[in-house]
Image (spheres, helix red, strand yellow):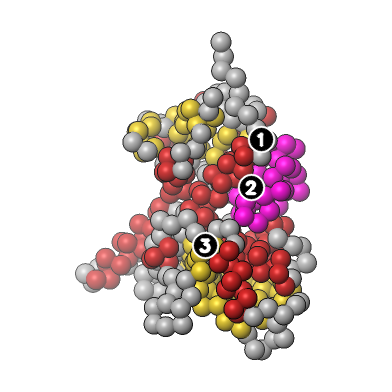
Amino acid sequence: MGYKVAVVGATGNVGREMLDILAERRFPADEVVALASSRSLGTEVSFGDKILKCKSLETYDFSGVDICLMSAGGAVSKEWSPKIGAAGAVVIDNSSAWRYDSDVPLIVPEVNADAIVGFSKRNIIANPNCSTAQLVVALKPLHDKARILRVVVSTYQSVSGAGKEAMDELFAQTRAIFVSDSVETKNFPKRIAFNVIPEIDVFMEDGFTKEEWKMMAETKKILDPKIKLTATCVRVPVFIGHSEAVNIEFENPISADEARDILREAPGCLVIDKRERGGYITPHEAAGEDATYISRIREDATVEHGLVLWVVADNLRKGAALNAIQIAEALINRKLIAPKKKAA
């Protein structure tokens, strides 16, 4: 008997990606339900070769659901995830609503799958921020080898991380510039077409943005609370795929060749690192792919034990939808959940 899976936020970028990945990976589901707000009631979404009509989150009965993939934003998750968990479903939430709750595990399966057992306290598991997910996949095997002390990361984040309307804005602004129309700014604080914006999420009192703080806090929770991390997060005019320039300082020696060999064998990582023209991965090439790509591995001579990496991944997949479904697969593979019995 398979599982009953509900996807909340099925009409959004990540929700649609979740449905695609469930079908691609042949997730053991007997039934998949697409849910959204009442205003999207009846909206059709694709699931493999099927078409699902969205049902209303507000009126849905979750008593028969085994797994709920939640991608409807923090406010919705704060209200609904506890209710859904209380009904007996395990909620895997893509928002930031539960990431910093000590009773909710924050999981990247390649990094800290063992922590998943803590889900039973609330029946909620948190997905990390998209920029954090790909970062810790690359950091984990290197940390195991040489112990990371400090990370300095600069991100180049695609507009899809801000939702479908942000993607539409990049498209509309780009077209307007080409035809000499006026450029309208709605979702971003400044023009995004042919520009970069060093502001993602709100500013905090210390001058960092919330996105930058998330990377620091989440890396500590997922990987090691002793790691020091500082970030500068930048929105760039790319539709899909986040890139990161990562500078790492280690406690113990590690060479670029050693790091390359370690990362080649690490789960979720794919090394494309040729020291020649075009011998690296860009977000365009990573779009639609599951791997976290690592390129430009080199030693940093300014510290005693340092490396520099270029890390790229599809933010809608590994940064969100894929990671959530990998968490669900881990629950099943570790026999932490079983399908509810069907009513007689």
Q: Magenta includes 122?
A: yes
The residue at 36%/63% (across/down) is 170
Counting every numbered tag in the picture gives: 3
Q: Earlier in the sequence, mark 3 or mark 2?
A: 2
Q: Quadrant of the N terminus?
A: top right
- Few, some or many residues within 10 Å of mark 3 (<14, 14–19, 20+): many
Can you identify the residue that label 3 sits on?
A: 292
In the picture shown, does residue 59 fall above or below 12? above
Question: Circle 1 sits on which residue?
Answer: 335
Q: Name the element at disc 2.
A: strand
Of the pair 294 and 202, the residue shown nearer to us: 294
Q: Earlier in the sequence, mark 2 or mark 1?
A: 2
Residue 41, image x and y in percent?
Answer: 41, 31
Q: Is residue 103 left or right of residue 285?
A: right
Identity of the amino acid at label 2? Answer: Ala
Q: Cα distance, mark 2 to mark 1?
A: 19 Å
Q: Which mark lies nearer to you, 3 or 1?
A: 1
Q: Depth-wise, is mark 2 or mark 1 nearer the camera?
A: 1
Q: Give the mark nearest the N terminus, 3 or 1.
A: 3
Using the image, tell me which numbered label, if any, was put on residue 197: none
Regarding residue 312, the answer to whether it shows in the image is yes
Near mark 2 (Cα within 10 A), the count class, few <14, some 14-19 or many ≥20, is many
User: Mark 1: which amino acid?
Assistant: Lys
Give me the C-alpha separation between circle 3 and circle 2: 20 Å
Left or right, 300 with respect to 187, comes to right
Name the residue rendered at 59%, 71% in the picture.
Answer: 261
Q: Are marks 2 and 1 in contact (CB under 8 Å)?
A: no
Which residue occupies the extreme bottom position in the image? 302
Q: Residue at x 66, y 39 (%)?
A: 334
Q: CA distance from mark 3 to mark 1?
A: 27 Å
